[in-house]
Image: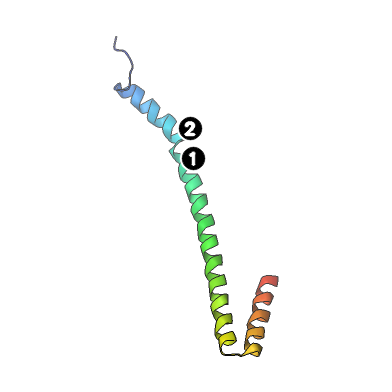
Amino acid sequence: MARMNDESPTFGRIDRVRWLRGPFGLTARVEQLEADMLEARQLHVRVAELTDLVAELLVPLAQLDPDRAAAILERYQGELGS
């Protein structure tokens, strides 16, 4: 009778199933990576929005146009409220 070891085909299949389905297996790792990617995308969008706002504010302020800067800030605050 052959001894089961790492080289045994049966042991390898069982081990792979445990690796894929276990709590620290591939499936759990992929799900966590997908959640992390979604969070990173959301943060990236937020940073892009804030960068756009800063750019929109700097141009009128550099041109000494306080009325336009105030309008941009009001629009931004309205977007936050909705």
Extreme residue in the right direction: 81
Residue type (three-letter) at the residue carrying disc 1: Ala
Residues at marks 2 and 1, CA–CA distance in whole angstroms: 8 Å
x 58%, y 87%: residue = 60
The residue under label 2 is 22
**Number of marks:** 2
Earlier in the chain: of badge 2 and badge 1, it is 2
As rendered, which of 20 and 42 lies closer to the eye?
42
Callout 2: SS: loop
Placement of the C terminus among the 4 image quadrants: bottom right
Q: Position of residue 26 (x, y in %)?
A: 43, 39
Q: Position of residue 28 (x, y in %)?
A: 49, 40
Placement of the N terminus among the 4 image quadrants: top left
x 56%, y 90%: residue = 63
As rendered, which of 63 and 76 lies closer to the eye?
63
Q: Quadrant of residue 65?
A: bottom right
x 66%, y 89%: residue = 67
As rendered, which of 24 and 62 lies closer to the eye?
62
Q: Is residue 21 above or below residue 12?
A: below
The residue under label 1 is 28
